[in-house]
Image (cartoon, rainbow, N blue to C red):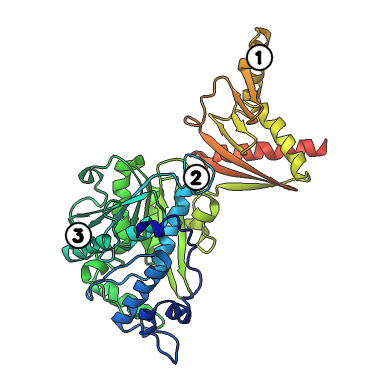
Amino acid sequence: MESSRLHRDIPAYDEDIDFVMLASQDPDFAKVVDPVTKTINFKDPKAVQQLTKSLLKRDFGVSIELPDDRLCPPVPVRYNYVHWIQSLLDTTSDRYDDRYDPDRKVLGLDIGTGASCIYPLLATSTRSQWRMFGTEVDSHSLDFAEHNVHLNDLEHRISLRRSTCDGPLIPLGALGLKQIDFTICNPPFYSSKDDMESGYALKAAPPSAVCTGAEIEMICEGGDAGFVCRMVDESLVLRDRVQWYTSMLGKLSSLHTVVARLKKAGVKNWAITMLRAGSKTRRWAVGWSFVNRRPRNDIARDSDISHALLPLPAAQTIATSLKAQDASHSLNAILSGLDLRWNSATGIGFAKENVWSRAARRKHLRQKTDLETSGGAEASNTVTEDSNTTQTSNDNGQEDATLGFKIMIEDMAVTVRWLKGEDFVLFESFCSMLKRSLSTRTQS
């Protein structure tokens, strides 16, 4: 059963669900579709449950059973959140290639997994090397979650644990975990019943779908913003024991609160996105990391979110008048004269510090001249022909680099992607150096 679900490349849900097509593919769903309107009654809990079950069955090969008195998770926005985390990890791996590595073993933690256990099921059904832990404070939900894991024969990849309301949200020690790759979380949105009722009252129209969520799923102290700020506080202790801390948020105001908390805590690497699912649903997701690998701009900087909330840009494009081949030759000449690691075959490089300042270049030239004079030319600057890699003798690679970058070359444009580092000024300085150097070579 499991093998049929592995290595699935499923894109994010962008459009509204085609109910007619889904009904033609799943007889159980056809039973709840109105033959005249070609839609379902979103006020009917059974119809809403069947939509979730049918989408999971068709798109992910997953089967679940749900209680009538707990949340029925809409699949599109939940999967879009999982898909975003996958992209977040793919663009911040230690391979620095911005691609999915099917051999990478990933371990995640779902905080408050709910009766459906939907996040662990979606994560493991689309990535064959991913394993998940899940915590849940509600015993009724936990019983159903464990049943759904068993229903899909995933006990060897999904482990669930009972947690407590007053315990840590990220209990790595209690779970026997030293490190994990990410957290995923859909916290209660509201801080009280009054908050929940006022939230409904402020909507332009009544809720379009029935909500079967229990109070424990809908309400917590401080709402979703308070919950995630607790996660931020715990992350300041755990730090890089988790590569990416993430959570969904139900209100844009909560995103403002959480980003402000991250900035106040001195977190320098975060990512945000709007989770769209069809024409109506909008949620937000935030992630932050103490590992200094930078996600791609399209993953971390959603263009539909206020600029004030966005993290620092991780790419700069330099306009030139050079054709791609000429720009490539120029860049190789520029970078081979610097004390850094540079692989022209991949376009990836690493520097321990600012090695492009005048003082740094003069120092490097003196060292190179001294070594050549003493017969050590090969040790000072070696070029491996098959990989086109230039590396100075005192460079130990990427681990202790303060700047990692990738250069992508097109006709009339060079894009520099920030791969690693915490110092944005250093990245900007590097880009400025390349712009000046390319401009000089163009004029000559």
Q: CA distance from mark 3 to mark 1?
A: 65 Å
Q: Name which quarter of the figure residue 223 lies in.
A: bottom left
Q: Name which quarter of the figure residue 362 lies in.
A: top right
What crowding class fits label 1: few (fewer than 14 Cα within 10 Å), some (14-19), or many (20 or more)? Answer: some
Residue matched to label 2: 294
Please state which amino acid type lies under the numbered disc 2. Arg
Instruction: Please tell me how many numbered marks the rendered image carries.
Output: 3
Residue 160 locus on image (x, y percent) = 23, 55
Please state which amino acid type lies under the numbered disc 1. Ala
What crowding class fits label 2: few (fewer than 14 Cα within 10 Å), some (14-19), or many (20 or more)? Answer: many
Instruction: Report if the CB atoms under discs 1 and 2 are less than 8 Å apart.
Output: no
Q: CA distance from mark 1 to mark 2?
A: 35 Å
Residue shown at 50% from the left, 62% from the top: 11
* Foreground residue among 179 and 267: 179
Residue matched to label 3: 137
Residue matched to label 1: 377
Residue shown at 26% from the left, 54% from the top: 155
Residue 280 locus on image (x, y percent) = 45, 75
Instruction: Report if the CB atoms under discs 3 and 1 are less than 8 Å apart.
Output: no
